[in-house]
Amino acid sequence: MKIKAAVVNEKGAPFEIKDDVELAELQPDDLQVHMVASGICHSDEALKKGDAVIGYPIILGHEGSGIVEKVGSEVKGFEPGDHVVLSFYGCGNCVNCLRGVPTQCLNYAANNLSGVRPDGSAHFKENGKDVADMFDQSSFTTTTVVRERNAVKVPKDLDLRMLGPLGCGYVTGSGTVLNTLKPKPGQTIAVFGTGAVGLAAMMAGRISGCTTVIAVDIVDSRLELAKELGATDAINSKGVDVVEKIKELTGGIGVDFAVDTTGVTSVMESSIKALAQGGTTATIAVTPNHIDLDTWNDLCVDDRKIVGVNMGDSIPQIDIPRLIKFYQMGMFDFDKTEKFYKFSEINEANADSISGKTIKPVLVIDEDYQPGK
């Protein structure tokens, strides 16, 4: 079937909305999803400008939400009319998936970042030529086809437009804290960068019972929002020795945990130096930058650790409903980070994401959608 999609024709090119893209046929374990909305993530921009190369032309988008239109013959858990959030694809069969860690799927790159479907077929075509996909999802479309394991069923009474970013940004930040770092009540955490991922990590620190939750950024308006969302302290790191400030706030000890979402070399290094003895930093930004460490003084002597975390070590079918419960309880107000844009405004929305003007842009693809219906 022909669909409308935002296509990036070559490295660094703007999004171009086209209405002649051919969508792949439904396979036995597929869902055909009518897209309602999609968040824009910095990972989309990384692929768009070629930091991580899949191939061009490409249809990006991996924070989609929509309504199931059709299901394949082998689908057991979904039916037409279900509301879903889309996330990454784990094969379900490799040793890591069977251990319950699909973010470490041995086929993760092939299934999500190869530009084709898990069976090697093209997800999309234009004029008979293959168009690459992202995350076996490509949510910058009016309709897409995904595997059953890409989808998470969500309550129909919630506004689908705001839920899509739960599939990546919010589950990555919160999962890094809840699934990987696992702070105990009374411990301390600092989050470097208060974009969508950072604010999700910060709110997860609060949910975990951290008594000191420090937000670090260079934009005062973001720091004010961080405090509204639960940060106990906020540091504008412009012209400030952030490591010394964090130690001041923690009685000279440093924080038990830090999360870096910036990918900036100096900031990542500061997140490690701000740790207490035995502390752990999680680096989760998509970045080409490196860090320079004295492993003896920065790590060994104080028994500090650095961990990389992919997608918050999440199981979307467990973690996304959990985040929705936290939201309903008033503990995870992710919607306060979002701003809606029309699908036709995708280049403006992406520019606002890059500049930081908007924390989490959300493209409303179906402007006729009515929440709760």
Image (spheres, helix red, strand yellow):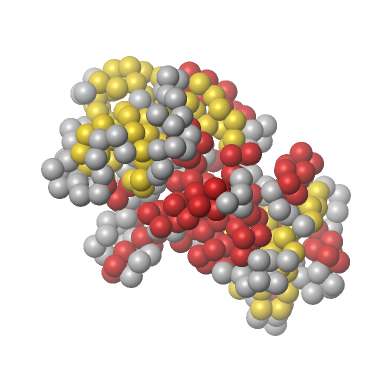
Snapshot quadrant of residue 304: bottom right
Snapshot quadrant of residue 294: bottom right
* Residue 150 horizontal/vertical position (percent): 33, 47
* Residue 155 horizontal/vertical position (percent): 41, 43
Q: In this orientation, which residue lies closer to the viewer: 4 or 231? A: 231
Quadrant occupied by the N terminus: top left
Q: In this orientation, which residue lies closer to the viewer: 126 or 162? A: 162
Q: In this orientation, which residue lies closer to the viewer: 60 or 11? A: 60
* Residue 12 horizontal/vertical position (percent): 49, 30
Q: Is residue 83 visible?
A: yes
Quadrant occupied by the C terminus: top left
Residue pictured at 57% horizontal, 51% vertical: 329
Q: How many marks?
A: 0
Is 6 left, or right, of 21 in this rendering? Answer: right
Work out whether 264 lies above or below 348. Answer: below
Residue pictured at 85% horizontal, 54% vertical: 240
Residue pictured at 31% horizontal, 64% vertical: 97
Q: Residue furthest bottom?
A: 301
Residue pictured at 36% horizontal, 45% vertical: 153
Q: Is residue 285 visible?
A: no
Is 328 left, or right, of 70 in this rendering? Answer: right
* Residue 185 horizontal/vertical position (percent): 66, 71
